[in-house]
Amino acid sequence: MVLVCTFGILYTLPNFVSKSTLEGLPDWLPSQQVNLGLDLQGGSHLLLQIDSNVVIEQMLESLVDAVRDNLREQGDNVGYRDLKHSKTEVSFVLRDLTDQEKARERLSSLSNITPNGQRDTVISFSDDGGVTLTPSDSSKNERINSALQQAIEVIRRRIDETGVNEPTIQRQGDDRILVQLPGLDDPDRIKRLLGETAQLTFHLVDVAGNSAPGARVPPGSKRLPSVEAGDPSYVVKNRIMVSGENLEDAQATFQQGQAVVSIRFNGLGAKQFGRATSENVGLPFAIVLDNKVISAPRINEPILGGSAIISGGFNVQGAQELALLLRAGALPAPLTILEERSVGPDLGADSIAAGKIAGIIGIAAVAIFMVASYGLFGMVANIALAMNMFLVMAVLSILGATLTLPGIAGIVLTIGMAVDANVLIFERIREELRVGKTPLNAVESGFNRAFTTIVDANVTTGIAATILFVMGSGPVKGFAVTLLIGIISSMFTATMLSRMLISMWMRRKRPKTLEI
């Protein structure tokens, strides 16, 4: 009992000193503090939505590539034409109707049976040689869900790189992500970081296509805009020679006095990059970021070390942000900011001050009521109440929980609930005294008989708080967490600490009567 109370006080005290003071204390002393949420500390709130259409388009493009690979086998190709995809399906036309069975066999690996017994891709053949592949709704939803989870991880890595403490990044609904950044003082930078998909690819420049500006783009190539002034666009080969997925590191640095980004590939990426530069010496090599050509330097010699330099007229901050984006990885699809809110630190300070005032008034009112109603026993209840507050703050500190304004409301509610158990016990003791029991027996019976009622009352409240925690999100969870912790700690202080203090007093004083 004493050990628990001592730890409660020790782990609460760091919240009353500054972080600089904590850094000067010995390492063996508790140093965890309760983190302040967005509404108390100020910061930014963003609600993002992933572009599901892009995710499905990428899925269909992958399916087109898979169809092409499956129909092409060395020495035994299946002839086809007009291979393309719409918004919902992939289609092509067989050149020879006698190849239908062969095509059906080749494409069978693209249609798998899901756990619910359905096909993830429905393949249909028509009498005129047309073939369509239609992904099922469940496979589309699975792809969107996977992209959303990947986006959450990429966002987390990007934000962690900026040094924001205790960010809240969580899924909302089918295609949305909630981002809360307490203490953020540069929300525009975060929006820039989250607004960039950062899909880095390397392509060979189609020299023939670029020799005649405005002419039709040759098959197998595409025209991409340039970020550099004076270079409106480039025609590049569709084939990706090296992908940013194989990047191992990216750092902002300087080359000839200009800010550039130094990148390093992993083993596979280094091998691909070395092969691409070895086979295409003398040709321009386009560096493409989010479908825009950053630069297109000429390959003067093979680059076999797995490292390269990206230059594109960056300033220092631009180079640092690009390096951060590349290190964190590419988003699977663009994100749209649906909602944006900023909370100033002054408003958060006002909320903290209001919460402190509410807490002080609540504690004072409860303490006065308990002393006025139960005398010395009321003083014991107040000691238990103070220890309950220490335990709640200690648990929040140990868990590294984030305290929000609804969380403060939960703590204030806990103040009233913390003495509720004592009220039940003291009223039961009064009843026992009225029937003629001795003070010692009355106290013993009061605690024992009130215990079941106390457990029932707190369990029902705990169930409600648990449902709020499981079903709710954000501020609702903050309220539920503090309420749950308060319920557990109040039961401990009321049924154990109060009982210990009253028992110690009675053993010492051995009163003949009780004033309660």
Image: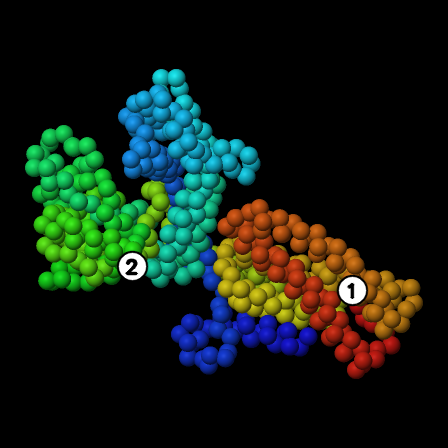
> Observer-nearest residue: 272 or 9?
272
Residue 45 percent across, percent down from the top left:
40, 49
Q: Which three-letter amino acid code belongs to the residue tagged 1?
A: Phe
> Observer-nearest residue: 403 or 275?
275
Direction from residue 452 to residue 485 in the image, left or right: left
Q: Circle 1 sits on which residue?
A: 426
For image coordinates 50% across by 64% down, the residue present is 400
Residue 489 percent across, percent down from the top left:
65, 64
Which residue occupies the extreme top position in the image? 127
Q: Circle 2 sits on which residue?
A: 267
According to the image, what is the colour scheme of the structure?
rainbow
Which secondary structure, mark 1? helix
Direction from residue 65 to residue 410 in the image, left or right: right
Q: How many marks?
A: 2
Residue 383 percent across, percent down from the top left:
67, 71
Question: Quadrant where the N terminus lies?
Answer: bottom right
Which residue occupies the extreme left position in the image? 211
> Observer-nearest residue: 31 or 53?
53
For image coordinates 54% across by 50% down, the residue present is 476
